[in-house]
Image: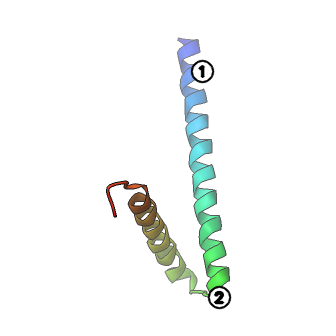
């Protein structure tokens, strides 16, 4: 039983590390984009703009990965 608990805890730690790494990369891309275009928003709007940016990147990546597109 103790071995199972250890494995579950290790899996959770790995999943958390991957999630944090992914979020950090997304945040870095957003910050670089903001700097490139010189945009800044109030803190209340910043979160919304970050979500829009991330959704657009996901759409672009999905489109680019689709080999059936011409």
State the mark number for residue 47: none
Q: Position of residue 32 (x, y in %)?
A: 66, 74
Identify the image quadrant of residue 59.
Answer: bottom left
Residue at the image point whose x is 61% and y is 36% from the top:
13
Residue at the image point whose x is 53% and y is 16% from the top:
4
Above-or-below relation of 70 to 47: above
Q: Position of residue 10 (x, y in %)?
A: 60, 28
Q: Along the horizontal axis of the image, is 10 left or right of 58?
A: right
Q: Position of residue 49 (x, y in %)?
A: 49, 77
Residue at the image point whose x is 50% and y is 82% from the top:
45
First-in-chain label (2 vs 1): 1
Disc 2 packing (10 Å; few <14; some 14–19; many ≥20): few
Identify the image quadrant of residue 15.
Answer: top right
Identify the secondary structure beneath mark 2: loop
Identify the secondary structure beneath mark 1: helix
Decide which of 42, 55 is in the foreground and name it.
55
Residue at numbered disc 2:
38
Name, please, the residue furthest toward the front: 70
Decide which of 59, 70 is in the foreground and name it.
70
Instruction: Say which quadrant the C terminus sits in.
Output: bottom left
The scheme the figure's colours follow is rainbow
Disc 1 packing (10 Å; few <14; some 14–19; many ≥20): few
Above-or-below relation of 38 to 59: below
Residue at numbered disc 1:
6
Q: Position of residue 57 (x, y in %)?
A: 48, 66
């Amino acid at each position: 039983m103790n071995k199972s608990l250890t494995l579950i805890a290790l899996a959770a730690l790995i999943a958390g590390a991957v999630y944090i790494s992914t979020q950090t990369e997304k945040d870095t891309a957003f910050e670089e984009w903001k700097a490139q275009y010189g945009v800044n928003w109030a803190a209340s709007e910043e979160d919304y703009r970050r979500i829009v940016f991330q959704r657009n990147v996901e759409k672009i990546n999905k489109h680019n990965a689709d080999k059936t597109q011409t």
